[in-house]
Image (cartoon, rainbow, N blue to C red):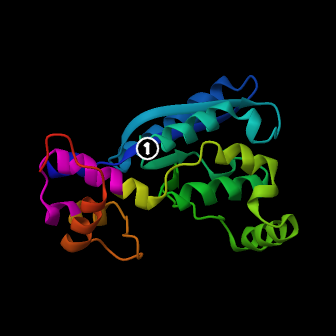
């Protein structure tokens, strides 16, 4: 039962060129194989057929994935490689920034953790672009993304506290589960029985609970 409770929910994302049926099959096999290797449960596969880099608005599959994350349905995203998210460096880094800020892990089919940004060279590029743009809010692509912005890691932790309290999970076990998910409390520290209790008291009562 413990293994089932901690199994991560994975969403797979495919980015396919027009007429690329063979490419679709190859990407799907790669990401599904990676999910199986990571013992993650696939809860959805999202895809976009792209002729060229069309910006975030053109990637309806990616926006649907972000919306699913916003509903708390996903813990990890798997793509064949980082460039499948977007070939444009800035857009890719911004998407990764938003996902990581929400506590969502992003992996390639090879099992590599994609950090935002994926490489030091891109880190310098992103910082320079963001400085020139003077905050995310001025970028239309990010405005579109933030309409579907996932909850913060703390919001995810609060949702788990509510869910597991309703299931009768003890405070100590709750803290262990939250820490196993890589979530931290409002102070950025690992969860303890006392911090879970404090958070639980501040949340709305669980129907049928104490």
Question: In the rendered view, does 198 fall on the left or right side of 38?
Answer: left
Q: Nearer the viewer, residue 35 or 10?
A: 10
For label 1, the crowd category at 10 Å Cα-Cα, with few meaning under 14, some 14 to 19 and many 20 or more, is many
Question: In the rendered view, does 87 fall on the left or right side of 78?
Answer: right
The residue depicted at 88 percent of the width and 68 percent of the height is 132
Please identify the dominant SS of the magenta region. helix
Question: In the rendered view, does 135 fall on the left or right side of 186?
Answer: right
Residue 126 seen anywhere in this rendered image of the structure = yes
Classify 48 as above or below 183.
above
Classify 16 as above or below 135.
above
Q: Position of residue 210 (x, y in %)?
A: 11, 51
Q: Quadrant of residue 136?
A: bottom right
The residue depicted at 83 percent of the width and 71 percent of the height is 131
The residue depicted at 46 percent of the width and 40 percent of the height is 71
Q: Position of residue 127 (x, y in %)?
A: 77, 72
How many numbered badges does the structure rendering display? Answer: 1
Is 160 colored magenta in this rendering?
A: yes
Question: In the rendered view, does 23 fall on the left or right side of 77?
Answer: right
Q: Nearer the viewer, residue 22 or 28?
A: 28
Classify 153 as above or below 68.
below
Q: Which residues are magenta?
A: 158-174
Q: Dot 1 lies on which element? A: loop
Is 109 colored magenta in this rendering?
A: no
Q: Position of residue 27 (x, y in %)?
A: 58, 36
Give the labeled residue for mark 1. Answer: 74
């Amino acid at each position: 039962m413990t293994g089932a409770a901690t199994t991560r929910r994975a969403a797979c994302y495919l980015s396919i060129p027009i007429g690329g049926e063979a490419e679709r099959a190859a990407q799907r096999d790669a990401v599904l194989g990676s999910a199986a290797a990571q013992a993650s449960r696939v809860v959805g596969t999202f895809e976009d057929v792209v002729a060229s880099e069309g910006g975030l608005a053109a990637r309806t599959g990616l926006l649907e994935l972000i919306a699913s994350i916003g509903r708390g349905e996903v813990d990890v995203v798997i793509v064949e490689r980082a460039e499948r998210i977007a070939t444009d460096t800035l857009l890719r880094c911004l998407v990764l920034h938003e996902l990581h800020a929400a506590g969502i892990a992003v992996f390639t089919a090879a099992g590599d953790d994609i950090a935002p940004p994926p490489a030091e060279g891109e880190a310098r590029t992103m910082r320079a672009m963001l400085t020139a743009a003077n905050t995310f809010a001025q970028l239309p692509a990010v405005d579109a993304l933030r309409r579907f912005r996932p909850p913060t890691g703390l919001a995810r932790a609060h949702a788990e506290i509510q869910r597991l309290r309703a299931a009768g999970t003890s405070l100590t076990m709750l803290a262990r589960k939250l820490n196993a998910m890589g979530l931290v409390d409002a102070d950025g520290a690992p969860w303890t029985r006392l911090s879970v209790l404090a958070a639980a008291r501040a949340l709305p009562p669980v129907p049928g609970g104490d």
